[in-house]
Image: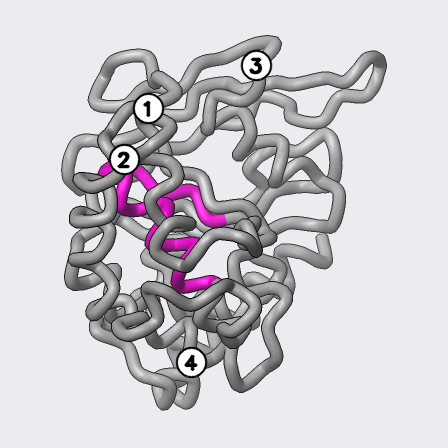
């Protein structure tokens, strides 16, 4: 395996007397897609807030390319798209760039280049309320990746979508991730989604969370919807389900 892009070493977090994360450690290789699953309330989102620099850990560290991670390292996409209804789709996608000091014209030009590969061409002047759920999530992801962060943190990005739209979005994410070579960490409650998208899946224990098990997904890429019929897919899915029940 290539030298680790990310090293998470001994992260522990408590809220008062409540221990949420307890010595969480793992690494992620460059260009790898790693999903994080675990029981509800075990601390998955807390882990992401630490990685995104929104909260300091009580113990442990996060290294990127061997150096302490900064707030500019990770692009964080939360569960809700958080698109502003009064801004056009284009102006929503440029928000992070503008906050970072880029001129509005330059930000629009940079984000506009991604509208076609993200399936949003022709909707630059639309308002978020005019988009489908899947298109809103594409816009939210575009807003995240246009900032050129080294690692994407995706926290249940498709959780609110209906089953058919969610499946389509998973296939789309598989396609664009391969095109751009992103390093991705994904939180999901959907085991099938984790297997379909991931190179590895980390299973967290109940709170206080530790990495309870790690499962490698030995399936070739690119992956299409019919990969779910592969016996190796079923075996990985069954193994993760068993790990969650322990």
Q: Nearer the viewer, residue 117 or 128?
A: 128
Q: Is residue 97 above or below residue 228?
A: above
Q: Residue at x 55, y 13 (%)?
A: 56
Could you tell me how far apart the alpha carbons at marks 3 and 1 are, in whole angstroms? 17 Å
Instruction: Return the x and y of residue 231 as percentages of the image width and height.
Output: 40, 84
**The N terminus - image quarter:** top left
For marks 3 and 2, give the one nearer the viewer. 2
Dot 2 corresponds to which residue?
149
Helix, strand or loop status at disc 3 = loop
Could you tell me how far apart the alpha carbons at marks 1 and 2 are, in whole angstroms? 7 Å
Q: Is residue 203 left or right of residue 43?
A: left
Which mark sits nearer the N-terminus, 3 or 1?
A: 3
Helix, strand or loop status at disc 1 = loop
Could you tell me how far apart the alpha carbons at marks 4 and 3 are, in whole angstroms? 36 Å
Which mark sits nearer the N-terminus, 4 or 1?
A: 1
Q: Is residue 237 left or right of residue 103?
A: right
Instruction: Return the x and y of residue 134 as percentages of the image width and height.
Output: 48, 72
Which mark sits nearer the N-terminus, 2 or 4?
A: 2
Could you tell me how far apart the alpha carbons at marks 2 and 4 are, in whole angstroms? 25 Å
Q: Is residue 45 left or right of residue 192?
A: right
Q: Residue at x 84, y 14 (%)?
A: 17
In the rendered structure, are the residues bearing label 1 and label 2 in contact, judged by CB atoms less than 8 Å apart?
yes
Dot 1 corresponds to which residue?
72
Helix, strand or loop status at disc 2 = loop
Q: Report the span colored magenta.
A: 137-154
Dot 3 corresponds to which residue?
57
Q: Is residue 116 magenta?
A: no
């Amino acid at each position: 395996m290539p030298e680790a892009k990310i090293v998470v070493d001994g992260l522990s977090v408590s809220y008062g007397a409540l221990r949420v994360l307890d010595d969480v450690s793992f690494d992620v290789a460059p260009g790898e897609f790693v999903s994080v699953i675990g029981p509800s309330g075990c601390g998955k989102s807390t882990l992401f807030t630490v990685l995104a620099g929104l909260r300091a850990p009580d113990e442990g560290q996060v290294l990127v390319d061997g150096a302490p991670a900064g707030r500019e390292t990770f692009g964080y996409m939360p569960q809700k798209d958080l698109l502003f209804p009064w801004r056009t789709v284009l102006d929503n996608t440029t928000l992070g760039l503008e906050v970072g000091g880029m001129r509005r014209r330059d930000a629009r030009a940079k984000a506009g280049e991604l509208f076609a590969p993200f399936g949003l061409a022709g909707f630059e002047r639309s308002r978020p309320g005019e988009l489908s759920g899947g298109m809103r999530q594409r816009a939210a992801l575009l807003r995240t990746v246009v900032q050129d962060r080294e690692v994407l943190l995706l926290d249940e990005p498709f959780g609110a979508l209906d089953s058919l739209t969610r499946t389509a979005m998973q296939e789309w994410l598989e396609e664009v991730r391969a095109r751009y070579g992103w390093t991705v960490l994904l939180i999901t409650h959907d085991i099938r989604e984790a297997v379909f998208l991931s190179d590895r899946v980390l299973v967290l224990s109940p709170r206080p969370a530790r990495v309870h098990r790690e499962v490698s997904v030995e399936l070739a890429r690119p992956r299409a919807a019919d990969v779910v019929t592969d016996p190796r897919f079923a075996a990985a899915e069954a193994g993760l389900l068993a790990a969650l029940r322990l």
